[in-house]
Amino acid sequence: MTLALTLALWGPAGRLKLDESIESLYDDQDPMLIAYQRSKAEFGGDEFLLVAYEAENPTSQAELNRIRAFSDELSQVPGVRPESTQDLWRTLRNPRATGIVRVALRLPATERALLELSEHLLIGEDGKTVCVILRLEDQAKSPVSLRETIRQVRALADAHDPPAFVAGEPVQIQDMFRYVDQDSWKLGIASSVLMMGVILFFFRNLRWVLLPVLIIQATLLWTCGLLQLSGIKLSMVSSMLTSLITVIAIASTMHITVIYRERRETQDRFAAFRSTFAYLAVPMIWVSVTTAIGFASLMTSGATPVRSFSVMMALGSMLVPVLCLLILPGGMLIGRIHSDVRPPVGEKFLSAQLQRTSTWAINHPWKVILGTVLLTLFGCAGLLKLRVETDFSKNFRKSSPIVAAIEFFESRMGGVGTWEVSFSVPKEFSELPLDKIRDLTDELRDLKLPDGTGLTKVVSLVDGIDLVPRIPLSEEEKRGLFRAIPRFRDALLEERRDMMQHLQPEMEPSLYNAEKGRMRIVLRALEQQPAETKLQLIQKVEETATRYFPDAEASGLYVLLTYMISSLLGDQVESFLYSSIGILLCMTIAFRSLSIGLISLIPNILPLILVIGGMGWVDVPVNIGTAMIASVSIGLTVDTTILYLTDYLTARREGADHLTAVHRAHGGTGMAVLLANISLIIGFSILSLSNFVPMIYFGVLVSIAMFGGLLGNLLLLPGLLRWINVAGPQPPDSTETSAAMDAVDGVGQLAGE
């Protein structure tokens, strides 16, 4: 049956793809996304690639010819709209210009005006940096993927002399997806190999290496197949799917292995198998449920990638015990009788240390509690220092090409943060409130925040319309020009509009949609700024624009990314509360005691407070990776608590006192959870190899939280249990255990057959 289901899901799993669209990062009903999509529909989309380099004398004819050749080469890349390419040669030497426009372009005053308009767009403030702006095709019409278009543009930029830098929001988004795609397999393979090595080192038996591999691969295949059938796509944090399923499956297998090994010392293979599964069946179900709750709590997030990640991980967590039950019986019961697991390397030493730990924790409960309280207060103080990272470039390693490109544009071209403010206007060009638009444009240029930050570029339609009368002509130039066209002195609006369309052909259609009666002003700001500065700037621009046009709204990728990441701090608190409540209910139901349910949370919550508070103290920002550690970590660390309490309460039910029960739990489950946590910590640490910085933070911080949870369960939990009356509560009852044993008998018989 297992093989048949696996083969049936093989096809759907192979069709599951990573959704690389920008829209996949946001909720369909997100107002910011709706505004962005509306702007794309009204103005034809704004996905641009910026290619810049340093030239010695950009306005010389020789350099303009070089710019033209390079621009033409870039325009031929599939996925680029060649008719919309902008560069300094096309602006200053407009090849489509005829008549009076051709005459005007030869005037020094015209060149000065066009250069002023092009500053921070096609030429830097230093007068040496030049930029080619490439407009991308709609992906539905493009002959190649956006990733391939960017790859080819980068190849041309690298081959250019001097090498050019490629930037733009589409590059950042695609680099993120590219790294996620690469990490998905690299991290999965690395974590699997490393953790298999850990198992082989401890147990020295290939059987216990191969069985987790089968469970991991089957879980991944089933998860991906079910996701594809349900219509869910992989998100940008999906690179963790393989590595997380790996560590969860290995941790579950490790628990079963250690308990099975203990029983094999006194029982035959089938009896040991039967008693192991009977003993662990119900606890492992609760382990699976609490882990799934930790991941499912991320559904409260406002970030769509986090929500889709929560669905796939909750599903994978629930599938792990199912596939353990389906695969392990055959793997454990088939083969040579004497091929069972050997005692773990260093078992006596680890066991002795665990017993010392339990004795010390019981004899010094107040020291443990006092230390815990002080560390918790330290963590709580750090929570007040948390900040959110909205600089999207910080999601990449400093050595990556995109970071180098962003820094080049930030210092030379006024940044890469391109966005807009749009508003309703009359549909007739002659009725446009140009004076009001001009005043708004000027006010946006002068806008400054208290720290002196403002917009680095503001472009509106009036800049093109005013281009002609703004050209300061000498008397000799005026006489020659006015003789050529007598009406030039008193040029009317339509004539100025016609002149603008010749000088800047792309300007009007990109800024004014007459059919829908919408206009926008394009803005540019620095990307590498604090979150507070970006949010204040966006708010100030909207407040300024709404005084002129009440329906004005800011939109663009700069706005989308800022608001998406800034909401993550609140998401972390909300998901953490939901996961804590859900796990409390599970623990209360599992052990039929609210007091034990509450106690079970304490050693798992306090390390998280310390870890998250520590982020504030060491100035680690909240990003899309760190925003998930609280709910994920508590769902994983509470697994240790469930198994520990099962051992402890079983001993108490059999008549053992508190001290004896603690020693038994430390010596039995303690060994299993110690080895499992070592595997988990090593597995999560593999994420530090990721090229996507949020995943690095996630892996390292979850590893630290797991270690803190382990210490909390081994040191703090014994002291807390001292003051709790555990005579009434029982671990999973005998009825459930009997049912589990019956089920195991059936599975074992099938495996034997």
Image (cartoon, rainbow, N blue to C red):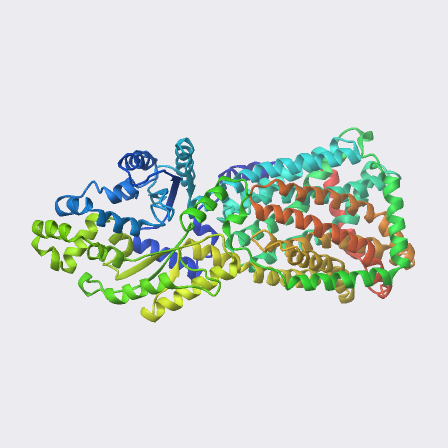
Query: Above or below — where is 750 with respect to 735?
Result: above
Q: Nearer the viewer, residue 125 or 671?
A: 125
> Along the horizontal axis of the image, is 340 left or right of 571?
right
User: Which residue is at a point 38% across and 46% down the rendered structure image?
Assistant: 126
Q: Position of residue 188 (x, y in %)?
A: 61, 38
The reply to whether residue 204 is visible in this rendering is: yes
In the rendered image, the quadrant that contains the C terminus is top right
Query: Above or below — where is 30 with respect to 504?
Result: below
Image quarter for residue 491? bottom left
Query: Above or below — where is 495 with respect to 198?
Result: below
Q: Which residue lies furthest to the front in this view?
A: 475
> Along the horizontal axis of the image, is 65 left or right of 310?
left
Image quarter for residue 581? bottom right
Q: Where is residue 601 in the image (x, y as percent from the top left)?
A: 73, 61
User: Which residue is at a point 61% across and 39% down the rendered structure image?
Assistant: 187
Q: Which of 79 and 11 is in front in this view?
A: 79
Q: Position of residue 97 (x, y in %)?
A: 17, 43
In the rendered image, the quadrant that contains the N terminus is top right
The reply to whether residue 592 is visible in this rendering is: no
User: Which residue is at a point 22% across and 49% down the rendered structure image?
Assistant: 110
Q: Nearer the viewer, residue 214 or 278?
A: 214
Image quarter for residue 39? bottom left
> Along the horizontal axis of the image, is 679 left or right of 169?
right
Q: Position of residue 19 (x, y in %)?
A: 47, 45
Q: Which of 425 and 123 is in front in this view?
A: 123
> Along the horizontal axis of the image, is 478 left or right of 308?
left
